[in-house]
């Protein structure tokens, strides 16, 4: 059973470009979380999605950031018009669901975004 | 607002020592608590998950305890090895009206085990 997959592992963008980060959850998992780890800071929750639905986006910056989890295909975190402050490691986690309470979250290897 | 604190921020021990990492959280209303390991430049590996109704979990040389009423958890590592060197992260899933399962992380304890 493959784990959570993220690609690309490393992404370099110039200021003003768009960044697209992809996450494929573990087989059988329908819940996806995105977290961001800024340099010298802890991991911060960004957004929680189920298939075709954004459930909680309380951690997402109000502008330039968006996320989706379509019926088919991976979850996508999209950052428009990137700035240097967006440079960070972005982690995706998946879990099997909320029946009886939140399940264990399994993390992917992360995408390290560098904005030049 | 839930906040998670880990002490110490860094720890260096000789190989073979038993050690304890501490985690505290401000709101006892949680679904569960997870301990993770993160190697430099890598993702997170889940070590132990403790549900709010449980007191402890064990896996090999690792034992995690949970005292929800006092807002504390400890991760005990027995007979430490150089391969245990990593950053250890504690995270709680708050129990509240949103119930989304999102994790609130501590800043981590960076452990170095010297041969």
Image (cartoon, rainbow, N blue to C red):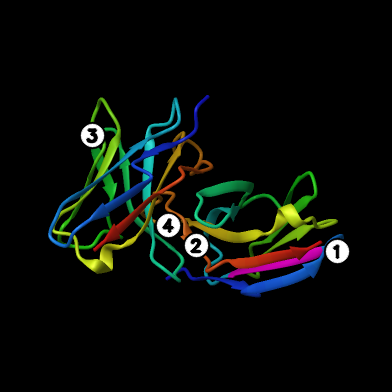
The image shows residue A53, relative to residue B106, as above or below, that is above
Asked if marks 2 and 3 fall on the same chain, the answer is no
Callout in the foreground (3, 4)? 3
Name the residue carrying label 3: A52
Asked if marks 3 and 1 fall on the same chain, the answer is no
Q: Give the magenta range.
A: B19-24
Name the residue carrying label 1: B17
The question of residue A96 being in magenta is answered with no
The image shows residue A35, relative to residue A6, as above or below, that is below
Q: Quadrant of the C terminus of chain A?
A: bottom left
Image-based side of A106 in relation to A22, left or right? right
- The x and y percentages for residue A77 are 26, 46
The alpha-carbon separation of the residues under discs 2 and 3 comes to 27 Å
Q: Residue at x 76, y 51 (%)?
A: B62
Is residue B74 visible to us here? yes
Image-based side of B109 in relation to A14, left or right? right
Name the residue carrying label 2: B105
Asked if marks 4 and 2 fall on the same chain, the answer is yes
Image-based side of B31 in relation to B19, left or right? left
User: Helix, strand or loop at disc 4?
Assistant: loop
Is residue B72 visible to us here? no
The label number, if any, that marks residue B96 in the structure image? 4
Q: Chain of mark 3?
A: A
The question of residue B23 being in magenta is answered with yes
Of the numbered discs 4 and 1, the one sitting upstream in the chain is 1
The alpha-carbon separation of the residues under discs 3 and 4 comes to 23 Å
Specify few, some or many for label 1: CA neighbours under 10 Å numbering under 14, 14-19, or 20 or more: few
Asked if marks 4 and 1 fall on the same chain, the answer is yes
Q: Residue at x 38, y 45 (%)?
A: A9
The alpha-carbon separation of the residues under discs 4 and 1 comes to 39 Å
């Amino acid at each position: 059973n493959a784990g959570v997959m993220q690609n690309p592992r490393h992404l370099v963008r110039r200021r003003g470009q768009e960044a697209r980060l992809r996450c494929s959850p573990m087989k059988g998992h329908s819940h996806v979380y995105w977290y961001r780890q800024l340099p010298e800071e802890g991991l911060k929750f960004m957004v929680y999605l189920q298939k075709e639905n954004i459930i909680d986006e309380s951690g997402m910056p109000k502008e330039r950031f968006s996320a989706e989890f379509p019926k088919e295909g991976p979850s996508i975190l999209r950052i428009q018009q990137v700035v240097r402050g967006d440079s960070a490691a972005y982690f995706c986690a998946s879990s099997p669901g909320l029946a009886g309470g939140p399940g264990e979250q399994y993390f992917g290897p992360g995408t390290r975004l560098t904005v030049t | 607002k839930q906040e998670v604190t880990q002490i110490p921020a860094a720890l260096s021990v000789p190989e073979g020592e038993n050690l304890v990492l501490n985690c505290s959280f401000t709101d006892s209303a949680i679904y569960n608590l997870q301990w993770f390991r993160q190697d430099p430049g890598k993702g997170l590996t889940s070590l132990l998950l403790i549900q709010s109704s449980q007191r402890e979990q064990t896996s090999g040389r690792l034992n995690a305890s949970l005292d929800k009423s006092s807002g504390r958890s400890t991760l005990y590592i027995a007979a430490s090895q150089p391969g245990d060197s990593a950053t250890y992260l504690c995270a709680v899933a708050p129990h509240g009206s949103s119930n989304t399962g999102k994790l609130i992380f501590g800043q981590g304890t960076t452990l170095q085990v010297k041969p």
